[in-house]
Image (cartoon, helix red, strand yellow):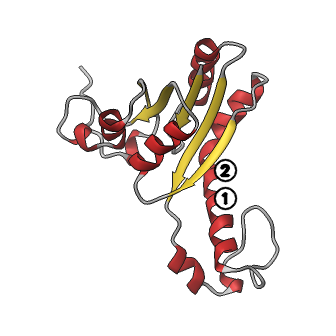
Amino acid sequence: MHILIATTGVLSPAPVADLCERLAGSDGRLTVMTVIEVPRHFLESMADDERRSFLDDTSWQSDTAEMKALTYLEERGRRAVEPIMSAFRARGQEPEIRFVEGTDPVEAIVSTAAAVEAEIIIMGATRRLFTEQAWTSVSARVMERTQCPLLLMPGHRAEDTGEIPRLEL
């Protein structure tokens, strides 16, 4: 089984890695992806002394606009996938990583699933189901467009989502 894990950093790493280990078995394939919107115009306008890479401390002075965009994509992508990748590595797994540049995460996830021939997509759900807002979420829109099963796991950053607060009884 080939599993595509689409993350922005909201998935709880250990439960996802446990589930993938059960679903994929010893011969399964895993791909972890994230979608990043690269602000190319902004990056091109930055002076070299205003922006330093998180990955190294060399200057961007000789870098082309494309190299700046690729560096940005990799930095942001690594930040999003690192927690889940650490959980997989702790289990002796090394999934493929894909950093996808795009402005529409739904299109990026669906096209990546098709490209890697994923048999299931795992994503985080940060909004409560059965609310009006939930039907406009990325996960609901992926569900409408994908041709393979979609598994939603609860996300852990509800404060960033505008989620309706739960009432404690």
Give the amino acid at mark 1.
Glu
The percent position of residue 120, horizontal first and vertical second, equals: 49, 25
Residue at the spot x=46%, y=49% of the render?
108
Residue corresponding to mark 2: 78
Q: With respect to residue 27, does 97 lie above or below?
A: below
Numbered mark located on residue 16 in the image: none
The crowd level at tag 2 (other Cα within 10 Å; few <14, some 14-19, many 20+) is some
Residue at the spot x=81%, y=71% of the render?
57
Numbered mark located on residue 75 in the image: 1
Residue at the spot x=27%, y=24% of the render?
168
The percent position of residue 90, horizontal first and vertical second, equals: 76, 26
Viewer-nearest residue: 63 or 10: 63
Viewer-nearest residue: 148 or 89: 148
Viewer-nearest residue: 110 or 124: 110
- Relative placement, left or right, of 125 versus 3 is left
Query: Do the CB atoms of the residues marked 1 and 2 lie less than 8 Å apart?
Result: yes
The percent position of residue 136, horizontal first and vertical second, equals: 25, 44
The image shows a total of numbered marks equal to 2
- Relative placement, left or right, of 105 versus 145 is right
Residue at the spot x=70%, y=80% of the render?
64
